[in-house]
Image (cartoon, rainbow, N blue to C red):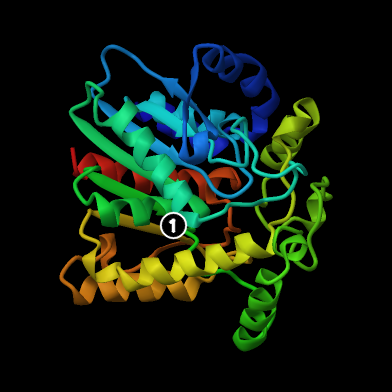
Amino acid sequence: MTRHRNSWFSREAGFAAFTMGALTDFWQQREEDEFLGVDDIPVRFVRFRAENHDRVIVVCPGRIETYVKYAELAYDLFHCGFDVLIIDHRGQGRSGRLLEDTHRGHVVNFSDYVDDFERFWQQEVATGPWRKRYLLAHSMGGAIGTLFLLRNPKAFDAVALCAPMFGIIIRLPDWMLRSILDWAEEYPSLRDGYAIGTGRWRALPFSLNMLTHSHERYRRNLRFYADEPQLRVGGPTYHWVREGIQAGEQVLAGATDSTTPLLLLQAELERVVDNRSHDRFCELRAAAGHPCWGGKPYVIKGAYHEILFEQDAMRAEALNAIVDFFDEHN
């Protein structure tokens, strides 16, 4: 395992050979499946399992993401001795869409994501053979996972959150934003339309992206969408933005009831979610007697939002912190 973890620091130099060789071989071992979520929306997921593994990590991705994108992460966690399960949330990835325009990021109720995840946990995780169960959640998945844990605090032995969406960076005064969202709710065509400044998916040049500093990983992620256009999801609807903001508020309102051992990773150069909400969440947990690991967010210096898709040094620091944290709760 030590040798494998050491490889995290120098992978980008031979990234093409790695992805076309070892990673492709690993991906071919996957098991894909689905279940019916709220309103009978098909929700897809993937499994990576080995008979000698007695621990599992459930990965809860962010908005617009797909488990196809998480192959490298699954590979690394699997080779650290964990089984890996990854869900594609409703409205994205290989799961069912909710609107005719499949590029629109939409949800009727944010709780639908949480209900879907609860069904997934009951069907695949709770009934599994593992001795220990861990949750690793990114961005929107962090909000979904945290709200799930408020319902089921004993469902996982420990949880790691990467840049969780407890607040969203929007360049408008709060009063103005809420007025716009309230107004859009009155008109279905607006409510379910793209939020201002967003639209259908398009490939941004690397120089304009604010998600990762890794050329190799960014280029690979774009290739997924080129090879499988049905994976593409663009901007969120006004209604999704409203639901997302309210979900963050619900997380903070329930922070004092959050008791699962928790590591919160924060990107220093965050441009998507509001880092102040992470600080507040950790403060509230600490005041309630359940501090986050280290007592505050673990800041990955120099990182953009997608910490687990960053350049090798930043990604390796985060992955090592996650694996070490889970090992502490073995």
Left or right of 145 on screen, residue 180: right
Figure disc tally: 1
Question: Can you say which quadrant of the picture contains the N terminus?
Answer: top left
Residue at the spot 18% in from the left edge and 28% down from the top edge: 131
The amino acid type, in three-letter code, at marker 1 is Ala
Q: Position of residue 317 (x, y in %)?
A: 44, 48
Q: Is residue 243 left or right of residue 185?
A: left
Residue 294 locus on image (x, y percent): 27, 63
Query: Which quarter of the picture shows residue 253?
Result: bottom left
Mark 1 falls on what kind of element?
helix
Give 282 or 146, whichever is nearer the viewer.
146
On screen, 265 above or below 41?
below
Question: Which residue is under mark 1?
Answer: 143
Residue at image location 62% in from the left, 22% down from the top:
18
**Picture quadrant of residue 323:** top left
Residue under the image location 25 percent in, 62 percent down: 258
Q: Position of residue 202 (x, y in %)?
A: 83, 47
User: How far across and down, in percent of the image, does residue 149 sit?
Assistant: 29, 52
Q: Is residue 315 above or below residue 79?
A: below
Quadrant location of the C terminus in the rendered image: top left
Q: Is residue 162 visible?
A: no
